[in-house]
Image (cartoon, rainbow, N blue to C red):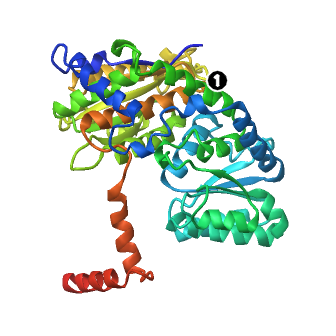
Amino acid sequence: MKSIKLDITKAACFLGEGAVKAFEPKVKEAQQALEDGTCPGNDFLGWLHLPSSITPAFLDEVQAVADTLREKCEVVVVAGIGGSYLGARAVIEALGNTFGWLVQDKKSPVILFAGNNIGEDYLFELTEYLKGKKFGVINISKSGTTTETALTFRLLKKQCEAQMGKEEAKQVIVAVTDAKRGAARTCADKEGYKSFVIPDNVGGRFSVLTPVGLLPIACAGFDIKQLVAGAQDMEKACGKDVPFDENPAAQYAAVRNGLYQSGKKIEIMVNYQPKLHFIAEWWKQLYGESEGKDNLGIFPASCDFTTDLHSMGQWIQEGERTIFETVISVEQADHRVDFPFDEENLDGLNFLAGKRVDEVNKMAELGTRLAHVDGGVPNILISVPCLNEYYIGQLIYFFEIGCGISGNVLGVNPFNQPGVEAYKKNMFALLNKPGYEAESKAIQERLAKEA
């Protein structure tokens, strides 16, 4: 089969001759540290060889539970936040019908995502939509106490039991959680829910190829065996013994670190296919949470082109030159739409008559890349043959291993996220959560002084 391809020529040209190659020793050392488990955060390296460790029997088990949900449910709600939902949503949206929730084919349930915000109107509208529907819930949380997800799951659990009965609800509520501890594990064991384990050594943002991602993706009707097969092949292609010039993840880590050192502080993930919007959202968490610490790290941003060329295009073309772009280019569309001829030609577009819409899109992509490079924006190109499970699996592992290497080259711990806890402490103090009395008093005094 084909493979996704990396082209760094339009980025490397912004660096000195041989600058990317000069990173080879650092990149090799960083990757070896991952393999040896000697890098910071080495207790969270379970993702590194996860694809090759997944067995057909395990995938069959995940698929069997997904088939039960598909058979019994009109809707499946995935309750999770951050890495507990972004990967699954990214794959489902990349592979699915853009309007699938409107033109449901009855073969697959509608997949909805909740537990990723505390919007009261969002939750009200969700519970209203679910009234009278047969729905199931996949509750994804290692602890079971993450505020956004726990709040949502409590609402959905009660509604599911009220509408379907407690015994029937047990068959359509699935927990993906810790093996032994935590509120979600306690609830699953007490209620008798089917459950899957989030490995202790796999962090949320690296968990797409665990049941965190695989179960929702299978529920949506996509081939998780092909997804894993793509990741397995990319694991081989990015192995530590693969020469630097042939290892796409090593080259990606090298060129982005070179650009960062040269003053490029923002990486914009660009796509020309609306289906890839959530791939960029997942990528932003992966790289932002992994590298953004110790006052270091490239800021991960994203744009959907050509849409955002009409809002952000001016800044990208002529704004502060602190950016570079990584473009995901899909070589082949799934469907064909030809541009029609119009006798009046009021819009002046008859010169496009007979051309595929995707050809117009490709020329917009090429023209934009040329313009941005001319405008001082380095461009990294990732070519994907088409959007299917196999190539998305490749893309996932490519970005994961690239992130692990890049974070180590940068000199941070790519696998922790201490800064995420700051807002939680303040929120709990403001809500007077038991155990936060001292913090509550301190924050109230601070707010009084600032008023």
- Nearest the viewer among 41 and 263 is 41
Left or right of 168, for residue 137:
left
Q: Image height check: is 352 above or below 377? A: above
Residue 223, image x and y in percent? 69, 32
Q: Disc 1 marks which residue? A: 335
Residue 307's image quarter?
top left
Q: Position of residue 378 (x, y in %)?
A: 26, 25
Q: Is residue 48 left or right of residue 318?
A: right
- What amino acid is at disc 1? His
Residue drawn where x is 52% and y is 17% of the image: 3
> Could you tell me which residue is drawn at 71 percent across and 31 percent down?
56
The quarter of the rendered structure image containing the N terminus is: top right
User: Which quarter of the rendered picture does the C terminus lie within?
Assistant: bottom left
Q: Nearer the viewer, residue 401 or 197?
A: 197
Question: Quick one: 274 or 434, which is closer to the camera?
Answer: 434
Looking at the image, residue 91 sits to the left or right of residue 26; the answer is: right
Q: Is residue 174 above or below residue 389?
A: below
